[in-house]
Amino acid sequence: MNQTQRSKYLRAALEVLAVVGLAFASGAGATPAPAAPAPPNCSAAAEYHHLDFWIGDWDTFETEAPGGPSLARAHVDSIAQGCAIHELYEQNDGLIGDSILSYDPVRKQWQQTWVTNRGSIMVIVGNFKDGALVLEGEVHLQDGKSVIQRITWTVQNKGVRESAMLSKDDGKTWSPAFDVLFLKHKD
């Protein structure tokens, strides 16, 4: 390649680099910004909001003694852009329970997964019936035993009542497990 050809080649290469540099500077050839995520389907679907009455900061009392001492503090929040409910339950005796409640549109059921700092795990499922959420399933206790528990949540006056029945014989007989009333926490 002679000097003249080399000069033409270098000028052409510089022109190409200049055009490429201008293209990048002006945004041509830049990667487009990702599209905004679509809102979750559950944010507008009514089924996901049937339990919204429980969202809040609560003190928990024995149902028969709502004016007595609070047994626990519970924080119940909407999470995952309205697709689930998170409960953090902190009892005065040191028990801590953490749960996620969510609606499954495929099975058309609610589910709660609950775990405690004492090693108990519970997964229960069910539906709303007559204005109450009723969930049932196995509870695995720290000692390795399993029982069936049925829990019901209902609006009661200015609070939320949560009551449970327990079966140690695969549902043949039931006995009360607990019955508490959640009232809005007062600072």
Image (cartoon, helix red, strand yellow):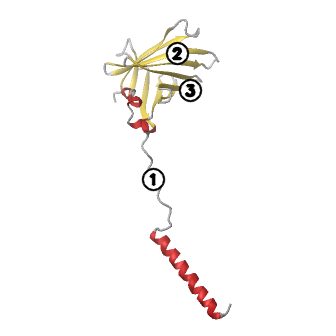
Q: Position of residue 44 (x, y in %)?
A: 38, 36
Of tags 2 and 1, the one toward the viewer is: 1
Residue that label 3 marks: 117
Mark 3 and mark 1 residues within 8 Å of each other at the beta carbon:
no
- Residue visible at 56% across and 26% down? 117
Helix, strand or loop for disc 3: loop
- The amino acid on which the numbered mark 2 sits, given as a three-letter code, is Gln
Residue lying at 39% horizontally and 14% vertically, measured from the top left: 63
Q: Secondary structure at mark 2?
A: strand
Marks 1 and 2: in contact by CB < 8 Å? no
At 58% from the left edge and 10% from the top edge, which residue is drawn?
A: 170
Determine which residue is flagged by label 2. 149
| 175 up-or-down from 12: above or below | above
Residue type (three-letter) at the residue carrying disc 1: Ala
**What amino acid is labelled 3 in the image?**
Asn
Q: Position of residue 70 (x, y in %)?
A: 40, 20
Tell me residue 158's x, y (percent): 31, 21
**Can residue 183 be spotted in the picture?**
yes
